[in-house]
Amino acid sequence: QPMVVRGIDDDRRVVVYKPPRVLLPEDDGSTSEEIDEAFLLTQIYTAERAMATTEFHSRVTTEEEKVTVVFDFRNYVRKNMPSTSTVITMIRMVQRCYPERLGVLVVVDAPFWMRAVYNMVWPFLSAATRDKLRFASGRDAVGEELRKIAGGNEELRVMLEDGDISSVDLTDYTRQPFYSPYEPLTK
C-alpha cells in the first residue's frame, strides 16, 4: 500500500498521505508475513523520507521539524488491515524513532473501533497531544479539515479530498531526491 510525502502545508510542515487501503486479491500469492513486512517497510521508508524532507526544508528557517500526517480510512474494511501485532510494532517504532515529530494527525472517516479507543484514552492524553489529533467524518467535515492542510496548494487539496493518488507516479516518486516531497516531473 503506497504512502507518499506530498507537499508542504500552510504551517510549513511536510504532508504525508496514506490513501485508503485497497483489498488485496485473495490469490496474489502473498503470505500474511510478507504483507505485514511490506507494510512495515512502507512505513519506515515514508517516515524516513518525511524526516529528510522536513529537515531539508527547515534548514533555512527556525521552524520546528514536524510533519502533518493524513490517514484516510474511506471504504475501510477490517479484512484489509495489517495484523494487530504489526500495527503495534509500527506504533512503537514511530514513538521510539520519531519522538515529537508529529505536528498534526488527521484521521479521515475513522472506523468505529478507532473512535472508540480514542474516546477511551482521550481523558488521559495531554492537551498538547489532543491538539495534534483531528478526526473528520463526512464529506463536509473532511473537506474543511483537508482545506486547512492544503491551503493554496490546489493539487494537494484535490488529491487529499478525492483520496486518489493516481496522479503520483510511484516510480518517479522513488527516483526523486529523498529529501523532497513528490512533484510531478515535467517532460
Image: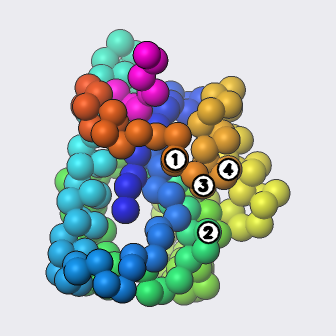
**143 or 89: nearer the viewer:** 143
Amino acid tagged 4: Glu
Q: CA distance from mark 3 to mark 2?
A: 8 Å
State which tag comes first along the sequence, 4 or 1: 4
- Indicate the position of residue 36 as horizontal and vertical percent values: 24, 75
- Helix, strand or loop under label 3: loop
On the image, numbered disc 1 is attached to which residue? 166
**Which is more foreground, mark 3 or mark 1?**
1
- In-front residue for pair 63/12: 12
Residue labelled with disc 3? 163
Q: Residues within 10 Å of mark 1 (few under 14, many from 20)?
A: few
- Callout 4: helix, strand or loop? helix
Q: Is residue 144 visible?
A: yes
At x 42% / y 22%, what residue is drawn? Answer: 185
Percent position (x, y) of residue 70?
52, 53
Q: Secondary structure at mark 1?
A: loop
Question: For the stretch drawn in magenta, what is the main secondary structure?
Answer: loop
CA distance separating discs 4 and 1? 13 Å
Badge 1 amino acid? Ser
- Residue drawn at x 34%, y 36% as measured from the top left: 173
Residue corresponding to mark 2? 74
Q: Which residue does the numbered mark 4 point to in the structure image?
A: 161
The residue at the point 29 percent across, 28 percent down is: 176
Region of the chain picked out in magenta, as a range: 180-187
Q: Residues within 10 Å of mark 3 (few under 14, many from 20)?
A: some
Relative vertical location of residue 118 with respect to residue 16 in this rendering, above or below:
below
Amino acid on which the number 3 mark rests in the picture: Gly
